[in-house]
Amino acid sequence: MSLLTAWLASPPPDAAVEISLERVSAAVVSRRGFTATVQAYAVQPLPVGAVAASLTSQNIVDRAAVVAALRSVLGSLGTRPARIALVIPDVTARISLVKFDQVPARREDLDQLVRWQIRKSAPFPIEEACIAYTPAGGRVSAAEFLVALARRDVIREYESVCDEAGVYAGLVDIATLSVVNLFLASDGVPAGDWLLVHMRPEHTSLVIMRDEAVMFFRNGAEGEEGSLADRVHQTAMYYQDRLAGQGFTRVLLGGSGQTAGALDAARRGLEERLGVPVEAIDPTRAAALTNRIAATGDLADILSPLVGVLLRTQREAVTA
């Protein structure tokens, strides 16, 4: 699923770029038949405070530093991309599941219905919003949609950085949904109910999937709404009580935390609470690495959203 599709146009992007709080990263993935390969990737750390991810306020604080980092990673790929898929922090968008009793036949009418529904909870005037949605494959029918709400000027901050660096952001999506796409765009989509936990130093997102359908999305900033254990407990209760959950077939964990041992601590806590072995999210199962790329400790965290968004757009281009 590529949510913020207002910026999507064919052909598929040449590369993917992620702008996060701590770094700018980029990757190129080639596909031959059913085989995908990471041809190159690059990472450039950002100064502390250069990006301040927020739903409602300024995100690009040190524009010069972000543009310089983006130019650096693009120059290290071995090819000069013109169009990119851009991945931005989860907290720049609010993700909701919206269900209707009846879905209008005309797309224009559905657009208005979604905007009317989202207006009720938007933390800023709906006239300032970018709204994108896709069928969630939900619990009862196709009348349920996964909706992304973002402020237009916030998205434009990220897009304009790309403009200044000489590339066009043809698609914009958030990090965790891009990681979900790592599985949806591969041949190994987990069956049944599965839980994906994606950690970043500034936030943790939890997604419950039923086969290929998004059933639940929750994002929490670090230091808010209690600990990860509290959020997992609340999510598990919702899963059992509201989604008639019978247990997760797989639990997938990836990303990074504020401290070096955060991911291991999260893994132990998840296994203790859910009673299911926790698997590490491994993008190399969906896209192999060329021989010149060395596997490093943080490679999975760097590549997962980049590979996910590229594989999804490549598959959509083939099936369109």
Image (cartoon, rainbow, N blue to C red):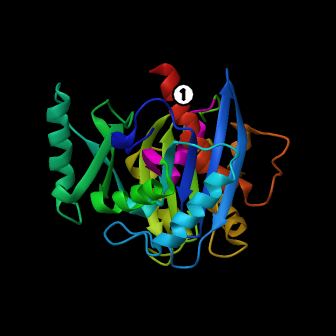
Q: Is residue 180 magenta?
A: yes
Q: Position of residue 163 (x, y in %)?
A: 43, 54
Quadrant housing the C terminus: top left
Location of residue 213 with respect to 216 vertically, above or below: above
**Percent x, y for residue 129?**
24, 56
Is residue 275 visible in the rendered image? The answer is no
Question: From the image, which quarter does the N terminus lie in?
Answer: top left
In the rendered structure, does residue 31 fall within the stretch colored magenta? no
Q: Nearer the viewer, residue 164 or 202?
A: 164
Residue located beneath label 1 in the image: 315
Q: Is residue 53 above or below residue 291?
A: below
What are the residue bounds of the magenta stretch? 168-186
x%, y% of residue 230?
51, 70
Q: Nearer the viewer, residue 233 or 213?
A: 213
Question: What residue is drawn where x is 49% and y is 52%?
Answer: 166
Element under disc 1: helix
Residue at x 59% of width, y 71% of height = 46
Q: Residue at x 68, y 36 (%)?
A: 286
- Residue at (37%, 45%) from the top-left corner? 4
Closer-to-camera residue (124/32): 32
Residue 281 visible: yes
Whole-percent x, y for residue 285 in the image: 73, 38
Q: Is residue 295 left or right of residue 78?
A: right
